[in-house]
Image (spheres, rainbow, N blue to C red):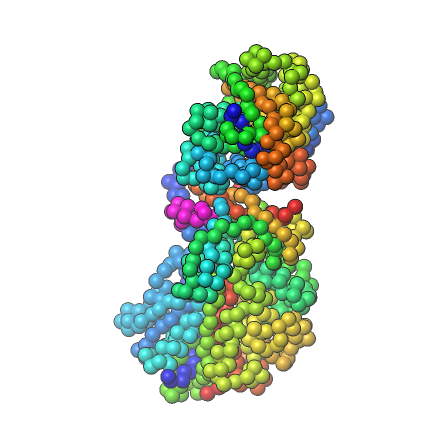
Amino acid sequence: MVGIITYGAYIPRYRIKTEEIARVWGANAAEITGGLGVIEKAVPDYDENTATFSVEAARSALRRRPVDPADIKAVYVGSESHPYAVKPTAVTVGEAIGATPIMTAADYEFACKAGTAAIQTAMGLVSSGMMKYAVAIGADTAQGAPGDALEYTAAAGGAAYVIGNDDPIAEINETCSYSSDTPDFWRREGEDYPRHGGRFSGDPGYFKHTLGAANLMMELRGTKPSDYTYAVFHQPNAKFPQKASKMLRFTPEQIKTGLLAPTLGNTYSGAVPLGLAAVLDVAKPGDRIFVTSYGSGAGSDAFDITVTDAILDKIDRSQGPTVEQMLSTKKYLDYAVYARHKGKIRM
Amino acid sequence: MREVAVIGAGITKFGERWDTSFRDLCTEAGIAAIEDANVAGEQIDALFVGSMSAGRFIGQEHVGALVADSVGLGGELHVPATRVEAACASGGLAFRQAVAAVSSGMSDVVIAAGVEKMTDVGDSTDVLAGAADREWESFAGATFPGLYAMIACDYMHKYGLTREQLAQVAVKNHYHGARNPFAHFQNEITRSTVMNSTLVASPLRLFDCSPVSDGAAVVVVCSLDKAREFTDTPIKVLASAQAGDTIALHDRPDFSTMGATVAAGNSAFRQAKLERKDIDFVEVHDCFTIAELCAIEDLGFVPKGTAGKFTEQGETQLGGKLPVNTSGGLKACGHPVGATGIKQVWEVVQQLRGEGGKRQVEGAEIGMTQNVGGTGATVVSHIFGRA
Amino acid sequence: MSVEPVLRLYHTSSGGPKMTVARFWREIPQRYNMVGTKCETCGDVFFPPRTICPHCRRDGKIVPCKCSGKGKVLTYSVLSAASDQFSALKPYVLAIIELEEGTRVTSHLICEPDEVHIGMPVSSVFRVLDREGSDGIIHYGTKFVPDL
């Protein structure tokens, strides 16, 4: 059965509070925090980017379980902030984990679901018998235009998954997707910041596709929400996943562990991979995990996952930092320093 | 091997010489030296010039040819000219090459020049970082002050050097510089000035660092037996030494000791058949205040770890046991990189001729120079006496 | 829009004209994965790698040797003045680190200025070392953080 062999996560140490951004733009901090459910977000250091996150996450995964890099025959990185428009992040990761040169690689883009698309691809390559291990990563250093609503939540981080067949710590029983051409959020080539359709991103975007994929999954598996221990949804803020899970009849308890947005922000392609990593950090054999990502443009990928005994004896989770550890290791920036770090001030 | 003497020396004012170009600097110092030596152009057999980075500062290579041409030795006379480079020890190295050319009998009268035009670029930080290991020091985040600051951090940790003692090096060098009409800075300063100046790389502050300066210095050497044809005050070269070390600071066994200074110093004293107590004054390479302390220890004048106290007690100032850097050192006289090594020789010549003016070391008979490249990967050292 | 023809000047923090890509590409095993060398004759490990052992010279048998990335701080400085490459990181800590294999490296140490001390244990992380402007190559490499 194909599944997750090992996993790793990375969250940078800098934070900026929603109220600090609101202060700069003369907005009402309490309203914004209340409306989004996000009090602070993670931002990168000047010498970090999607590639460095991806490498750190992948190396963390490989420290947790002995995997011979020579058996990794594919690396896919999903992001909307790849450092190059042409030259893939995936080969930098491949080089940094010792998987080159005998491997295939490519970068993915699908807004916030590029990472889960990478997982699906990895599953296909492994299940078909083409290779023993494939690495799938979702990571981003998300950009919000100064003063735009997205600036409050656009955050940085990512997680890496080694997908394989033999002794996975979590079996991926099924994956299914729901996709359409929906212009809820986009960025044209050459533009610095994305644009979005405002409230249009909600029902025709996030909810239609998330519910579409989630309901399809439960239909295919013949399951209901109460069958699952945990549920992880895409989290552009705290409200959307809370509403979606409620609509699908999952409980706040089920989504709690995988809901990182309140103190992390929206890490775009890293969001669901990080949410899942937070669950895996504490999961026990037999736990069932329901995952549905969402990427604007638009599409959702759903996964039905069962944690195995291997999570206790085949992997040493203490060899890599947990999501909780990284969330609590933080240093606050004020807006000016934050802008310098993110390159919003042209140097 | 013939004995060698310095028969003439010339120097430009060091400083920000906005209206003076690279070749203007060469001409200014070169003509002064040639006149001081009473030597005719036709008598000059060779020219050696030390210049670290004309290529990066003004896009100019082939500096040997340019300098010779600037002082009228290129066309017609066709004097062979050679540029040598060892970062900040380029000048000292040029002098050593000139001494070797005469000593070996290959040439009779040779010019040794040092020149650097640093203010034609906006920021010299990156150019100077080429004196270190570009790939593994500079590219990793090291700046030149950063490297010497790490030496200072190590030294302070090992020997308990205080910030005040370190500051005194700069204060003392400004005291001397104020008495040198060619120095970049001619103002005296206080310890407070040093200790309150902008932090550059902890613990080093702005006033712990030598400045960016334009300048040139030129000397003329010939064999000792012919020296009196040119001058009544020939200065004899008693020793010429040079030593190398790893280019990167991180490869040294002890960051607070410059092995190349130790080796070059020992070699110099051996050649001259002298002891440390025979030296009346010394010009050392104080690119940063900490460097002066390490220099006088590594040359063997005081035990390791004690130079701070020795300085604090005033022993390295005029009138003390061992005046160090009566020229003002790199800190006050300025540091046009390639020129410094030759400036040191020029200062020794002034002192041994009794022409040190307000900074004359009483009874000066024997002087020494120490010129360092990078963080100590090259050290050139000479000892001089009156002929 | 400039009315003058614009000539892009190609000087970079590499210390020269915009370098050919090969210069840093050939160092990727060192910069990404700390692959150094070892002299099997005397046992010394070198990172950055040496092809000649300074101790054994031609008698030294040199083989590749990957370093673990763990080490301790030998000396350091907090830099307030930086090259263009590092100016956005000011003030930053520069340190000489002794790796557990015995060899030393100079590196940006990512920590608070008041955190660093001689002897502090550190481990390696993957970071951006330099970006050649907005349209050039991004150079990745290894820096260090305090060991938790």
Q: Nearer the viewer, residue C101 or A232?
A: C101
Could you say where residue B256 lies in the image, as x and y percent from the top left? 59, 66
**Residue beneath the point at 44% across and 34% down:** A73
Q: Can residue A10 be seen in the rendering of this structure?
A: no
**Residue beneath the point at 62% across and 72% down:** B304
Q: Which residues are magenta?
A: C17-31
Q: Nearer the viewer, residue B255 or A168?
A: A168
Q: Can residue A100 be seen in the rendering of this structure?
A: yes
* Residue that sits furthest to the right in the current view: A30
Q: Nearer the viewer, residue B13 or C41?
A: C41
Could you say where residue B167 lies in the image, as x and y percent from the top left? 65, 66
Q: Nearer the viewer, residue A214 or B3?
A: A214
**Magenta stretch holds residue B94:** no
**Residue beneath the point at 65% across and 17% down:** A227
Q: Is residue A101 above or below residue B340?
A: above
In this picture, residue A238 sits left or right of residue C98: right
In this picture, residue C94 sits left or right of residue B120: right
Could you say where residue B228 lies in the image, as x and y percent from the top left? 40, 88
Q: Is residue A277 above or below residue A253?
A: below
